[in-house]
Image: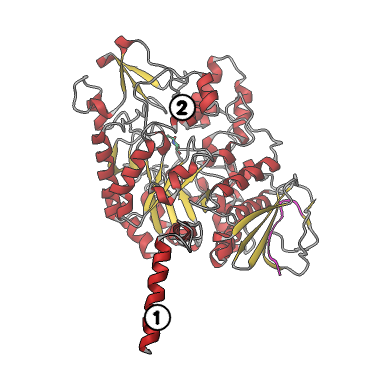
Amino acid sequence: MNKSIALSFTKVKTLLRLLLIFGCIIPKNSMAQEIKSPTEKKWWKEAVVYQIYPRSFKDTDGDGIGDLKGIISKLDYIKSLGIDVVWLNPIYGSPNADNGYDISDYQSIMKEFGTMEDFNTLLKGMHERGLKLVLDLVVNHTSDEHKWFQESRKSRNNPYRNYYHWWPAEKGKPAFRPGAFEADGSGWRYDKTTNSYYLHYFSYKQPDLNWENPKVRQEIYNMMRWWLNKGIDGFRMDVIPFISKDTTFPVITQADLNKNYEGRWDVYMAEGPHLHDYLKEMNQEVLSKYDCMSLAEGAGMLKSTALNFVDPDRHELNMGYHFDGTNLGYIPGYFKKMNPNWSLIEFKKIYSDWDAVYDKKGWGTIYLGNHDQPRMTSRWGNDSPEFRAQSSKMLTTFLLSMRGTPYYYNGDEIGMVNAKFDKIEDYRDIETIAEYEKVKIAGGDLKQFIEDQKTGGARDNGRTPFQWDNSKNAGFSTAEPWLKVNDNHITLNAEVQEKDPNSVLNYFRKMVNLRKSNPALIYGKYTLVDKDNPNIYAYTRELDGKKLLILLNFSNKTATVNLDYDIVNAKVLIGNYTDISLDKNLKPYEAIILELK
Ligand code: NOJ
């Protein structure tokens, strides 16, 4: 290069650098914003996460309970779905008061599920297939059978005493805190040995850990490092927003909740004084050291607080999932009783508003079902034989075409529906049983309660054994399963659907593939269209000049979408009917994705 040109080049570079330093050319932070925008590529943004409920997936040792070997035996099926990440519900040592969400040993495998050797084989088998594995991290509470708690309750000066929250009874009864799975609704339990109460936000079998104690935090970080060093790819963090507590346990009235916490206890509990200090510390000590993903179960998380968890500049977590969507349609004053006329307009508003939260920073998630929810098709679609398949395909289209990482629950890929048990004796879930007791104590209508559980709340609806085939116990187990199999497994099962190119299962695979081959479906801008349409959810996803239009009819009638776009010449990328007409009328539960010209 000519010497004088090279010199002036250097000068220009120096000048540019100076201008940059003084913020003259590029506004402050704009570089940082560009890098941190939602379109910054990350594997966990591009992933489709498949959630496995191990207890109900596949039993290989004939005890009626799913196990790790069962998951291993289905690894090729899991891979064939096209998904990238598997999240397993807790697999650790547990007396199972709350199906593994009450952990008695964080570094062991629940004996019903198998051994550590099985776990190693499972992890290896997943990695060999290019699948990542995410485990549940349950550290707001342990089991009361964890050795820390066994010690803690022995005496007031036991070295483990401060691992939990204790309230000496001589100070009188502690101020009310909710205990989710208790018939009396109280989050405090009296313990005779030391004449004290201990705190449990869930059942009395799940005492809350005292995160304000640095020793507790170090124990947890060590345990997390131990699993990550084994090679797992991240954590889904159970009720993580609840970890920090105001240990003076002041009286909180409904008026206080109304004033500062949207009238809700979960919001109060999610805003503990040191929550974000602890998440930052966890990030610094553990998460930042690994290429792993972290997901907060966003209990009590609001649109206004969500970025406090996932703004990348804060160095806390990657993603969180909110409850606004799954809480929609519940009738106040009842336990998860569903209003059958829930409003699609509100539904659209919730998902659109949450998309906007992450428009500039952070990253969202999307889900319609999990182990705490009824089946998505029964709740948001239509589980009648006429519309079951069509509506579950439509919901799958929604989940896999929104911005945010999709969390897809096992069994939904074959369109499993609610079990709708008629008797309380058929339910196994601690929550449903406690709520039933509450109604009984209040002299309420128990029959009505059972009816309400069929579409609304009961978590067991989403936990019935996976329907592999039409044999006895649906191919899940040779023994009587821990929870009844849905009778419809005779016709609704994976084996039948494997053979049918138009099945719900094969539609799911196509939809996963479509998302993965269209970056616009992952990173593209989301814009709601025809917002006031009460039957149709329509939106565009747009990236680098490519614009996709998603049309979803959430109703059981033909409905018309109002569009400014000319769609006659658009390219059809997928549809859940074989005869697709581009005339703006959508058949019942029809779903179409179009590429606009
Ligand atoms: C949320 C989990 O998803 C749920 O299943 C569990 O019962 C509670 N947290 C308590 O751990």
Q: Of label 1 and label 2, which has the lower sequence position?
A: 1
Disc 1 element: helix
Separation of marks 1 and 2 at Cα, in angstroms = 70 Å
Residue 47 appears in the picture as rendered:
no
The residue that mark 2 highlights is: 180
Q: Quadrant of ligand 1?
A: top left
Quadrant of the rendered image containing residue 522: bottom right
Q: The residue under label 2 is which amino acid type?
A: Ala
Does 109 sit above or below residue 129?
A: above
Q: Quadrant of the N terminus?
A: bottom left
Q: Give the range drawn in magenta.
A: 587-597
Along the viewing direction, whichever of 552 and 505 lies nearer the viewer: 552
Residue drawn where x is 31% and y is 12% of the image: 169
Q: Is residue 261 left or right of residue 73?
A: right
Does 517 sit above or below residue 59?
A: below
Circle 1 or circle 2, nearest the eye: 1
